[in-house]
Image (tube, rainbow, N blue to C red):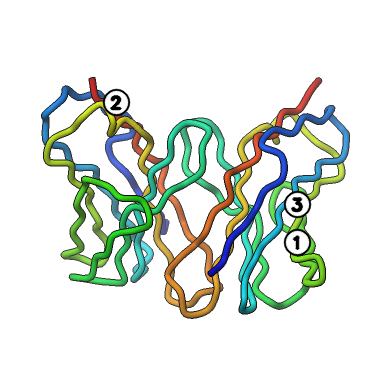
Amino acid sequence: AQSVTQLGSHVSVSEGALVLLRCNYSSSVPPYLFWYVQYPNQGLQLLLKYTSAATLVKGINGFEAEFKKSETSFHLTKPSAHMSDAAEYFCAVTTSGTYKYIFGTGTRLKVLA
Amino acid sequence: EADIYQTPRYLVIGTGKKITLECSQTMGHDKMYWYQQDPGMELHLIHYSYGVNSTEKGDLSSESTVSRIRTEHFPLTLESARPSHTSQYLCASTATGSNTEAFFGQGTRLTVV
């Protein structure tokens, strides 16, 4: 079975500061990993995905994530936070042959002026 | 433009009423999903479908039912709404293949009074 754990339900950063949102996964087979963003009263929008190609994945809005098998991690980063980055972020995992996308509990990012 | 649509976006309804939440996608995806999400909380899978005439219950028990008569349409029905059904309902679809991302609708925020 797969699972994801997002460390920190709330993260606050100053505008212009580094954004780091943590995601650790558990999977007995090679995982496919995703980061989604959700703005208030909206659905989820894909930021980026890891599908066993490059371990450093670049996404939209300047976000990127690095797949580290040894650490079972897929942390999301952005060098410089913007006010518009304030939202809820979800990490998700799936594997080959399954219908399930397992989502983490989410991290609410607050950007301080 | 390929997309996934949910209607209505917001619904306030009285206890005991029958409601149907609509979800349609234009991407030809075989797999479709319904998630329930309470404000600021994680997503819980309540129903999924592999294709036409294929529906299964998800991990979270739900009193709702679904149907999949056409590939593009995956409506969710509550025969008798109760206040405990108040939540946000998100519809999603994916193409065949586990390394593909899920595409989400905008969600329906349901309030049962």
- Using the numbered discs, state the Cα–Cα distance from disc 3 to disc 2 in whole angstroms: 34 Å
Residue B25 x, y percent position in the rendering: 33, 57
Q: Residue at x 43, y 40 (%)?
A: B37
Q: Chain of mark 1?
A: A
Instruction: Point out the frontmost of discs 1 and 2.
Output: 1
Residue B4 in sight from this viewpoint: no
> Is A101 situated left or right of B64 in this image?
right
Q: Residue at x 43, y 65 (%)?
A: B94
Given the image, on which type of amino acid does mark 3 rest? Leu
- Using the numbered discs, state the Cα–Cα distance from disc 1 to disc 2 in whole angstroms: 37 Å
Q: Which residue is mark 1?
A: A73
Residue B49 x, y percent position in the rendering: 30, 66
Count of picture labels:
3
Mark 1 vs mark 2: same chain?
no
Q: Residue at x 80, y 49 (%)?
A: A77
Q: Which residue is mark 3?
A: A76
Q: Residue at x 25, y 26 (%)?
A: B83
Q: Which mark is residue A13?
A: none
Residue A42 x, y percent position in the rendering: 48, 37
- Using the numbered discs, state the Cα–Cα distance from disc 1 to disc 3 in whole angstroms: 10 Å
Q: Which residue is mark 2?
A: B111
Given the image, on which type of amino acid does mark 2 rest? Thr
Residue A87, compared with residue A47, is above or below; it is above
